[in-house]
Amino acid sequence: MASPSRTPLLNTPIEKNGHIADILVSKYGEGELFHYVIQRVGSPEIVHWGQELSFHRAMECVEEFLKSFQTKQA
């Protein structure tokens, strides 16, 4: 049985504007690190990636990238 203080690994996929982003969490010292990877749907190529110290900030980065990409395509 997992310890209640241990955060399980999360995988949060977000699909929008022909892209898919995954946010995963890993342990980083005493805290957590949230990694995000953005790809075009159906493509193995990574178009953007990064890591943040909070889930909220990782989501913001994904949304900013997707919004920026949509603006460039218009």
Image: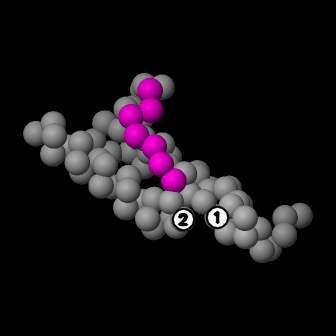
* Quadrant housing residue 42: top left
**Range of magenta residues:** 45-51
Which one is earlier in the sequence, the residue at label 2 or at label 1?
1
Q: Is residue 46 above or below residue 49?
A: above
Residue 10: x %, y % from top left: 62, 56
Residue 71 in sight here? yes
Q: Quadrant of the N terminus?
A: bottom right
Residue that protrudes farthest toward the right in the picture: 1
Q: Label 1 sits on what residue type?
A: Glu
Please tell me which residue is depicted at 16% across the width and 40% down the height of the picture: 72
Please tell me which residue is depicted at 84% across the width and 64% down the height of the picture: 2
Q: Is residue 24 left or right of residue 39?
A: right
Please tell me which residue is depicted at 38% across the width and 56% down the height of the picture: 61
Residue that protrudes farthest toward the front in the picture: 29
Residue 45: x %, y % from top left: 44, 26
Please tell me which residue is depicted at 15% across the width and 45% down the height of the picture: 71
Q: Is residue 72 left or right of residue 42?
A: left
Image coloring type: one colour
Q: Is residue 27 above or below residue 22?
A: below
Residue 32: image tag: 1
Q: Secondary structure at mark 1?
A: strand
Contact between marks 2 and 1 (CB within 8 A): the answer is yes
The residue pinned by badge 2 equals 53
Residue 40: x %, y % from top left: 37, 32
Residue 62: image tag: none
Q: Secondary structure at mark 2?
A: loop
